[in-house]
């Protein structure tokens, strides 16, 4: 018996387990289900489950947060403890793989909705059923969406528990326009690649295989892929091709009378594009096999009869109204929120007025192990801290770092441990990876995190070893961009190791020429990730007092960075010498916690250590700074005029491109250490208040640095959600 298992302290009517990520074909219906149950008076727990359905990486449906504001909706972590009258998993595909984290719930009945095909053989279907039972804590009932799905279940799972009634999805009302009116001349027949704009594979014949080539039929195609456009080059009738933008969906449906669709009801009995048409009064024309799903709510034809069916429908207004009326009845009695609530209440009885459920029970403490690799700087570690401090209070982050500054998180109240990197002590990397894997294993055993997050340019072999042993553990790579051209290309091959890759935003992203640019479609991009928000900066008076300078003098900040791998000491000495000659000017050097190199400073120059130094930026009129990720984005986000002096070591990120971006966009000046002869000119320009005012106006127009909060939300969803066990792991 696991003595750490939380005590079951709360009661819920229903728990909904779903993948609410954008891009999953059932996300909209899952959100609608939670909304319907909550509004019907049922206390509803909500668990995000990261299954194997197609979805964008950890981008949760935007309407879920709004729905969760209802007092009957309760967000839960996968390990949350409660009793419930019913558990509903909204998609059998969530359980294609063994669960990494079974739910900690006590419920007399568990239902898995079967809205889409999840297996074609008895062996595979049986595995899904077993995985669902393990995840949900006991035997499950399968609820088919329609008769074709029931026939499939009878074939592949003849001994499974199957609900006697069908459980079709909810069709939420639409608010983007009135139903279409009959066209005065010829029918408009539409084809839609799907409300989420999902692409048609190149192996799919697409709409040409079902749409008629007829001079009396206008075709309107929503989201037609480029590789299929040539098929319609000589179309006889009017033709419109619409881009797959969700915002155009209402206008598209208002312009068509009928929607042609293909597919098999055993694969997807209620395709989203067909449901979208029904909701807007558009008549679907479907393959005859769908008759058992839609009955009189649709018309039926194959490729050979599509043209005649469309023309006959258009010529018979009463027949079209008959189909629309049948669709309205079907929506009201089978596809509405009320119909779904009726099915749920029949399964569990009248709504139970549950007492207030302890949040600690539903969302117990979850752990994250944060790994960072910094050798000569603090960028990776700083981003990790920026994300950690924006997590909810019940999320516990532990740091295991390779940076000599790993003690800094302890100043913020985090537990932090240090491990030496092999390059720093000349250790064989193979031996180091073996020992590092054991070091991580020890941390996992002691801290029991749900997710490992690494911020590094290139992960290391020890992580692959750990991944193979822990298939139910979430793995996240925070991967800063702006790599050098041709640099670390092999590092991109590590992407398959991770459940999620987060790319912190960079104000200079438009100038990125590195290898990560081509992979942006595979990662979750967020805004700039900064440790402190600009709103946390002190006023000029308070910041000057803390630094020890006067607020009414010209104050200049020098931030050379660590300088450990790039010989720029002479340049910074020249800058100190020049600025020290200016009257009524105070110079402050921000000293890095892990810098090995020191400048020879006159007594008038103050040296300060502070973290984060951005809290004091308002005390200064301008700065000279290296162009690392944190310094560059902090300076711009806080509106501090700057001369950017990039670290041009070829092993570093492209700080020179950041500096060039700032200068060309009127956000600051750029100066290379190889151009000391330009130093005096640059300082003279920055001394001019009017020049600084121009930079300030430009920086004020930059977007807010929201990446820390965005990344924290994403990773917390992964930590709290149920995670399917990776099939390539053996434990």
Image (tube, helix red, strand yellow):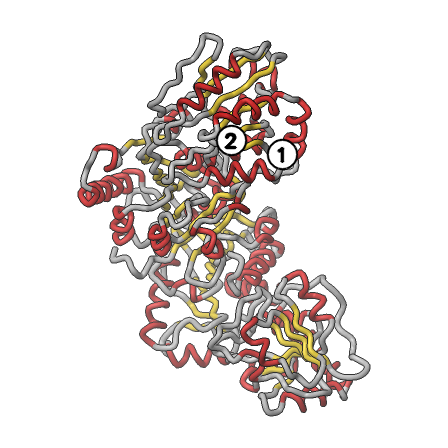
User: From mark 1 to mark 2, how far is it between C-alphas?
Assistant: 19 Å
Q: Secondary structure at mark 1?
A: helix
For the point 46% across and 59% down, which residue is it?
A: 87
Please tell me which residue lies in front, 162 or 655. 655
In the shown orientation, is residue 302 left or right of residue 656? right
Percent coordinates x, y for residue 226 in the rendering: 56, 71
**Residue labelled with disc 1:** 699
Judged by depth in the image, the label closer to the viewer, 1 or 2, is: 2
Q: Secondary structure at mark 2?
A: loop
Please tell me which residue lies in front, 704 or 284. 704
**Which image quadrant is residue 270 in?**
bottom right
- Considering only vertical position in the picture, is 608 above or below 25? above
**Residue labelled with disc 2:** 671
For the point 62% across and 36% down, which residue is it?
A: 666
**Which image quadrant is residue 327 in?**
bottom right
For the point 60% across and 66% down, which residue is it?
A: 195
Percent coordinates x, y for residue 255 in the rendering: 73, 73
């Amino acid at each position: 018996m696991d003595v750490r298992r939380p005590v079951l302290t709360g009661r819920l009517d229903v728990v909904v387990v779903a993948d609410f990520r954008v891009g999953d074909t059932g996300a909209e219906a899952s959100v609608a289900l939670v909304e319907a149950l909550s509004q019907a008076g049922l206390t509803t727990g909500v668990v995000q489950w990261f299954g194997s359905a197609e979805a964008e990486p950890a981008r949760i449906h935007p309407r879920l947060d709004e729905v969760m504001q209802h007092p009957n909706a309760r967000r839960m972590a996968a390990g949350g403890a409660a009793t419930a009258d019913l558990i509903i998993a909204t998609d059998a595909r969530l359980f294609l793989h063994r669960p990494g984290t079974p739910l900690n719930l006590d419920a007399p009945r568990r239902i898995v909705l079967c809205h889409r095909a999840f297996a074609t053989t008895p062996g595979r279907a049986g595995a899904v059923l077993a995985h669902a039972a393990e995840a949900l804590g006991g035997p499950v009932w399968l609820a088919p969406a329609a008769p074709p799905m029931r026939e499939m279940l009878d074939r592949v799972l003849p001994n499974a528990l199957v609900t006697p009634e069908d459980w079709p999805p909810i069709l939420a009302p639409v608010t983007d326009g009135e139903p279409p009116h009959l066209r005065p001349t010829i029918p408009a027949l539409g084809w839609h690649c799907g409300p989420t704009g999902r692409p048609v594979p190149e192996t799919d014949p697409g709409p040409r295989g079902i749409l008629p080539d007829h001079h009396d039929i206008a075709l309107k195609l929503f989201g037609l892929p480029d590789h299929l456009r040539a098929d319609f080059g000589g179309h006889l009738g009017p033709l419109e091709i619409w881009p797959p933008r969700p915002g155009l969906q209402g206008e598209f449906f208002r312009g068509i009378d009928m929607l042609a669709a293909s597919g098999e009801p055993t694969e997807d009995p209620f395709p989203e594009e067909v449901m979208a048409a029904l909701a807007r009064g558009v008549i679907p024309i479907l393959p005859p096999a769908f008759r058992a799903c839609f009955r009189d709510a649709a018309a039926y034809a194959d490729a050979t009869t599509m043209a005649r069916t469309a023309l006959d429908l258009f010529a018979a207004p009463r027949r079209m109204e008959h189909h629309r009326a049948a669709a309205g009845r079907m929506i009201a009695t089978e596809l509405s929120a009320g119909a779904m609530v009726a099915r749920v209440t029949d399964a569990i009885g009248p709504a139970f007025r549950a007492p207030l459920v302890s949040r600690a029970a539903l969302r117990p403490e979850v752990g994250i192990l944060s790994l960072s690799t910094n050798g000569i700087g603090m960028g990776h570690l700083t981003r990790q801290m920026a994300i950690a401090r924006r997590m909810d209070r019940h999320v516990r982050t532990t740091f295991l770092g390779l940076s000599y500054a790993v003690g800094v998180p302890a100043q913020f109240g985090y537990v932090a441990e240090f491990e030496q990197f092999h390059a720093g002590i000349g250790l064989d990397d193979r031996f180091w990876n073996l020992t590092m894997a054991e070091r991580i294993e020890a941390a996992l055993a002691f801290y029991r995190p749900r997710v490992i997050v690494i911020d590094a340019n290139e992960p290391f072999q020890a992580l692959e070893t750990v991944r193979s042993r822990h298939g139910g553990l979430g793995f996240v790579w925070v991967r800063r961009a702006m790599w050098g051209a041709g640099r670390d290309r092999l590092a991109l091959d590590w992407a398959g190791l991770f459940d999620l890759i987060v790319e912190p935003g960079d104000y200079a992203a438009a100038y990125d020429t590195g290898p990560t640019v081509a992979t942006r479609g595979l990662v979750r991009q967020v805004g700039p990730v900064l440790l402190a928000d600009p709103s946390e900066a002190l006023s000029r008076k308070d910041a000057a007092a803390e630094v020890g300078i006067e607020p009414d003098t010209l104050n200049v900040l020098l931030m050379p960075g660590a300088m450990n791998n790039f010989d720029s000491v002479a340049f910074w000495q020249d800058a100190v010498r020049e600025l020290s000659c200016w009257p009524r000017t105070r110079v402050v050097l921000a000293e890095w916690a892990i810098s090995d190199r020191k400048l020879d400073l006159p007594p008038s120059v103050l040296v300060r250590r502070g973290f984060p130094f951005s809290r004091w930026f308002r005390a200064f009129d301008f700065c000279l700074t290296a162009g690392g990720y944190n310094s560059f984005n902090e300076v711009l986000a806080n509106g501090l005029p700057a001369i950017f002096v990039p670290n041009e070591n070829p092993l570093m990120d492209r700080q020179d491109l950041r500096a060039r971006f700032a200068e060309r966009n009127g956000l600051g000046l750029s100066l290379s250490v190889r151009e000391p002869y330009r130093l005096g000119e640059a300082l003279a320009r920055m001394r001019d208040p009017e020049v600084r005012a121009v930079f300030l106006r430009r920086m004020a127009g930059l977007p807010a640095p929201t990446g820390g909060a965005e990344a924290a939300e994403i990773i917390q969803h992964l930590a709290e959600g149920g995670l399917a066990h990776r099939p390539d792991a053996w434990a």
